[in-house]
Image: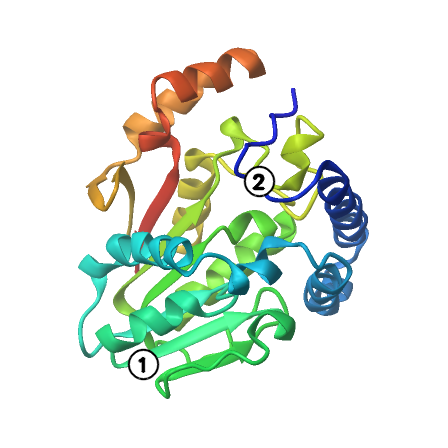
Amino acid sequence: MPKPVPETEPRTPDQLREHYEVEKELANRLRAASSDERRELYKSVYDELLRRVPTHPLVTRRDADPAVAAAAVAAQVEVLAPFLRPDSTFLEVGAGDCALAAAIAPRVGKVYAVDVSEEITRGVALPASVDVRLSRGTDIPVPPASVDLVYSNQLMEHLHPDDALEQVANIYDCLRHGGAYVCITPHRLTGPHDISAYFDDTPSGFHLKEYTISELVTLFNRIGFSSVRVLVGARGRFVQMRPFVAESLETLLARLPLRTRHSLTQRLRLTVVLGIRVIARK
């Protein structure tokens, strides 16, 4: 049951369809590629998407309402602020236009902004403490044990499922002892969450895999993180909880038909629990 297009969406139906068709084509390249081929493809397909779809939000965001863009960054800073110190080294994976990296810079000693695409950051002016590094998809090109806090927002779902374990292992290696990884990603049971949401019942664009909390907890435990917690809350007010409650809720919801599940999630505002925000400590 594809979701309706919100009234706030500035693009026409034809522009949405164009975005969908291009992204689906490029995503299928990634799905079909070998592990070695994906190392080059991650960068090239995202650069190609942004060139072929000039109405893509990542392109138009720079010209969007500055107040709206600032509010989106501020909301992320609220989540991260409790974990930052003046001497911290912060790393964002999937930094995009580096707006968050620039906002975090005054609060910490150093910022690494890691992304696969040169197109997004082209021409962006950044503070001297922000170091932009290009990744080939799963590598984290910074010194080992050099980072206090790693953050990714809407990133895990863009990885090929076979590559997720490798990237999280590389994130673990770049963290200092006691460091943390804050991972925000859309929940599979409330999706799809990419452009295919308007056309399909399952992700068929660049969301190569959408996760449940249980799946992420299992993945992080496998890598060796000493503890995994779920950040539950909204509007900057979050508490850390053991994953049990969220995992139990998603087990119950998974038994429901898609339409019933989506309706119940919206009506009861279950995204307070199911909006995946996981913090894993080394």
Residue visible at 70% across and 44% down in the picture: 205
Is 280 on the left or on the right of 139, as rendered? left
Residue 173 position, x and y percent, is 41, 69
**Count of picture labels:** 2
Nearest to N terminus: mark 2 or mark 1 = 2
Q: How many other residues sit within 10 Å of disc 1, few (<14), some (14-19) or many (≥20)?
A: many
Residue visible at 27% across and 52% down in the picture: 79
- The foreground one among 145 and 206 is 206
> Is residue 90 depicted above or below 52 in this figure?
below
Residue 236 position, x and y percent, is 23, 46
Asked whether the residues under the numbered discs 2 and 1 touch, taking CB atoms below 8 Å apart as contact, a structural biologist would say: no
Residue visible at 38% across and 31% down in the picture: 274
Q: Which residue is mark 2?
A: 9
* Distance between mark 2 and mark 1 Cα atoms: 36 Å
Residue 33 position by quadrant: bottom right
The secondary element bearing badge 1 is classed as strand
Identify the amino acid type marked 2.
Glu
Residue 131 position by quadrant: bottom left
> Is residue 54 depicted above or below 197 in this figure?
below
Is 227 on the left or on the right of 274, as rendered? left
Q: Which residue is mark 1?
A: 110
Residue 92 position, x and y percent, is 42, 66
What quarter of the picture does the N terminus occupy? top right
> Is residue 44 depicted above or below 253 in this figure?
below
Residue 105 position by quadrant: bottom left
What quarter of the picture does the C terminus occupy? bottom left
